[in-house]
C-alpha cells in the first residue's frame, strides 16, 4: 500500500525553467511533509518541509505548496540549474515516532 | 559540526552471514532512525531509537535488530542475510523537541549480499 504517491517518476527541464513535482497522501493523520534531495551514492538531504497549517512555504528557489482538502502537496524549483539534477523524494510523517513514509522519488534532469 | 557518520561505506557479504552497521548521530541529537533503500525506491523505515529505547519499528523481519548506546550512536544488525537484503542502509538523526521530524541522513552503507 503506497501511502504517499509521487509524480512524475522522471522530469527533464531546461536551465532556468520551473520544475514541479507532486505528491498525494491518504492518511489524514500526517502532519509533517518534507522534501528531500538525493544525489547518487549519497544520503537524502532535507530541502524544505511544511506543516498542514500553512499553505505555502518558500526557501530560496524552493517552494512547497500544500492543499489540505485535496491531500496534495508539491515542490516547485524556480530557475532550475544543472546542479539541481538529482532524485527528489516527498515524505509524510505523523505522531512522535519520527517515522517517515516516503514517495518513490522523481529523477530530475536539468539540461544546460 | 560533523554530520551523521556511518560505517562501513561498502560491505559485501554472503547469504546466511551476519552484518553490523554503525551510525553516529549529529552532536546534540538523541534520536536515531534506520532506513533501507533499495535501488530506485524511497527509503523504508526499519527502526527508531530515542534515549536507548526503541520508539518505532517498521515492517521488517526479526532478523533485523538494532540498539542505541549511551553516547547515542547506534548499531543495526541483520542476521541470516538474504539476497534481498542488498540495499543502501541509511541512518538519520534528529533532535527531540519542537521539530521532531527534521531528520538528517548519513551517506549510508551499501550492503551487497551474494
Image (tube, helix red, strand yellow):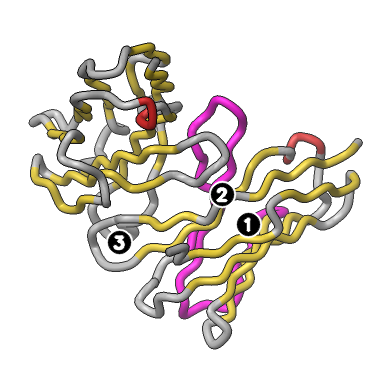
Which residue is depicted at the point 27% across and 51% down?
B59
Rendered image: mark on residue A59: 1
- Residue B33 in the image: x percent, y percent? 28, 42
| Label 2 – label 3 distance at C-alpha | 18 Å
Instruction: Tell me what residue is drawn at x 21 percent, y 42 percent.
Output: B61
**Given the image, what chain letter belongs to the residue carrying mark 2?**
A
Give the residue pinned by disc 3: B98
Which residue is at a point 18% across and 25% down the rendered structure image?
B79
**Quadrant of the image for the N terminus of chain A?**
bottom left
Name the side, left or right, on which A56 lies relative to B87: right
Give how far across and how far down residue B37 sits, in percent.
44, 38
Q: Is residue B1 visible?
A: no
Q: In the figure, A28 relative to A96: above or below?
A: below
SS category of the residue bearing label 1: strand
Contact between labelled residues 1 and 2, with CB atoms less than 8 Å apart: yes
A67, above or below B109, in the image = below
> Splitting the image into 4 quarters, where does residue B29 fall?
top left
Callouts 2 and 1 in the same chain = yes
Residue position marked by numbered label 2 in the rendering: A47
Amino acid at each position: 500500500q503506497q501511502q504517499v504517491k509521487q509524480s512524475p517518476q522522471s522530469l527533464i527541464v531546461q536551465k532556468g525553467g520551473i520544475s514541479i513535482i507532486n505528491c498525494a497522501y491518504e492518511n489524514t493523520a500526517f502532519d509533517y511533509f518534507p522534501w528531500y534531495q538525493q544525489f547518487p551514492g549519497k544520503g537524502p538531504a532535507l530541502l524544505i518541509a511544511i506543516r498542514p497549517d500553512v499553505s505555502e512555504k518558500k526557501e530560496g528557489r524552493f517552494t512547497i505548496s500544500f492543499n489540505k482538502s485535496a491531500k496534495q502537496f508539491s515542490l516547485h524549483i524556480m530557475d532550475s540549474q544543472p546542479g539541481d539534477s538529482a532524485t527528489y523524494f516527498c515524505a509524510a510523517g505523523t505522531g512522535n515516532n519520527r517515522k517517515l513514509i516516503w514517495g518513490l522519488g522523481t529523477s530530475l534532469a536539468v539540461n544546460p | 559540526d560533523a554530520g551523521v557518520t556511518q560505517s562501513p561505506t561498502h560491505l559485501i557479504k554472503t547469504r546466511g552471514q551476519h552484518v553490523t552497521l554503525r551510525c553516529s548521530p549529529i552532536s546534540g541529537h538523541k534520536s536515531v532512525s534506520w532506513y533501507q533503500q533499495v535501488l530506485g525506491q524511497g527509503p523504508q523505515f526499519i527502526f527508531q531509537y530515542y534515549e536507548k529505547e526503541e520508539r518505532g519499528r517498521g515492517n521488517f523481519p526479526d532478523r533485523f535488530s538494532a540498539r542505541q548506546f549511551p553516547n547515542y550512536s547506534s548499531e543495526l544488525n541483520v542476521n541470516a542475510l538474504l539476497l534481498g537484503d542488498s540495499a543502501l542502509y541509511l541512518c538519520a538523526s534528529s533532535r527531540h523537541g519542537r521539530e521532531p521530524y527534521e531528520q538528517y541522513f548519513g551517506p549510508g552503507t551499501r550492503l551487497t549480499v551474494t
